[in-house]
Image (spheres, rainbow, N blue to C red):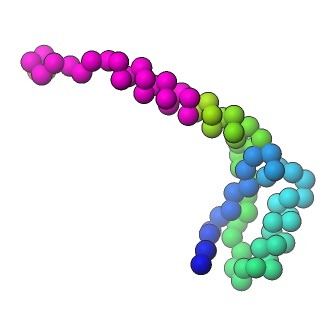
Amino acid sequence: MVDPELIVLGGGIGQAPGFMEAVEAELKMLAPVLPDVKMSALGADAVVKGCLAAGLDRAWELVTATIPAPAADSMP
């Protein structure tokens, strides 16, 4: 059993004309209580922004992995 409160339609498909309305119409036939259906704020750029965020996270991990930990005797 699934009971979401919110369904987010992402990417380019989420912004296609009439798609959100079609999803809501299908939900009306399936669910006694309708969840909110929203379009993602990222829109068609969701994949690109996700890739950039993942790449930046990985770059930060690689940069910080090369920084040596402070020596125990140098701590106050």
Q: Tell me what residue is drawn at x 68 percent, y 62 percent.
A: 7
Task: Give the farthest residue toward the bottom.
Answer: 32
Q: Which residues are magenta?
A: 54-74
Q: How many marks?
A: 0
Picture quadrant of residue 19: bottom right
In the rendered image, residue 13, in percent from the top left (x then y), is placed at 81, 50
In the rendered image, residue 32, in percent from the top left (x then y), is placed at 71, 83
Q: Is residue 39 magenta?
A: no
Magenta span: chief secondary structure: helix
Q: Tell me what residue is drawn at x 80 percent, y 69 percent.
A: 24
Q: Tell me what residue is drawn at x 32 percent, y 18 percent.
A: 67
10 up-or-down from 46: above or below: below
Assign the C terminus to one quadrant of the image: top left
- The answer to whether residue 45 is left or right of residue 68 is right
Q: Tell me what residue is drawn at x 62 percent, y 68 percent.
A: 5
- The answer to whether residue 70 is left or right of residue 16 is left
